[in-house]
Image (tube, rainbow, N blue to C red):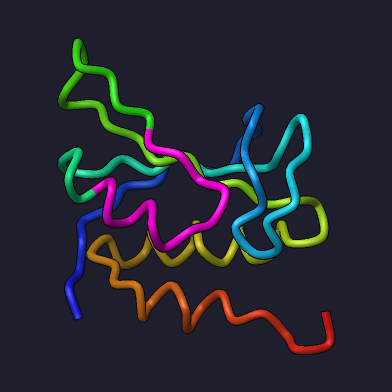
Amino acid sequence: MKEIKLYTRGIGQEFGLGCFVCGIKQKLMNNISVFVPSKEEGEEVEKWFKGSYLDFRPREPNWIQLKIGACDKHKDYLTKLNTLIASKINISKEDVDNVCKVEEKE
């Protein structure tokens, strides 16, 4: 499985995102901003997370960020994701799925 180099800026808040776990949209969401190496790789990683968006600005082609949100109920998953990215750097979709498995009880 393909791995992509990601760098996290840590957990913050962002307007207009959906929760990557349940898809709910709130006005202000918990989020992480993740730097990606290229627009193409960012578009690929964006497909891994519902409710996320790629912040690509042509005037800043070397500062491409993917914004990933989580509602308060799923903030723990966002924390796990942030820890994974901070510790591993090269991440695959399989890594994300293993760390962010949602309990069936939810």
Judge by depth and name the residue closer to the eye, 74 or 79. Answer: 74
Judge by depth and name the residue closer to the eye, 80 or 57. Answer: 57
Residue 60 falls left or right of residue 29: left
Residue 23: x %, y % from top left:
68, 56
Q: Which residues are magenta?
A: 42-54
* Residue in the picture at 43% in, 72% down: 96
* Residue in the picture at 20% in, 81% down: 1
* Residue in the picture at 30% in, 27% down: 56
Residue 95: x %, y % from top left:
38, 77
Q: Residue extending furthest top?
A: 59
Residue 40 falls left or right of residue 13: left
Q: Residue extending furthest bottom?
A: 104
Residue 99: x %, y % from top left:
51, 78
Residue 84, quarter of the rendered image: bottom left
Residue 88, quarter of the rendered image: bottom left
Residue 53 falls left or right of residue 100: left
Residue 13 colored magenta? no
Would you place residue 82 above or below residue 42 in this image? below
Residue 11 falls left or right of residue 1: right
Residue 97: x %, y % from top left:
47, 78
Would you place residue 45 above or below residue 100 in this image? above
- Location of the C terminus by quadrant is bottom right
Q: How many marks?
A: 0
Would you place residue 9 above or below residue 77 in this image? above
* Residue in the picture at 40% in, 46% down: 8
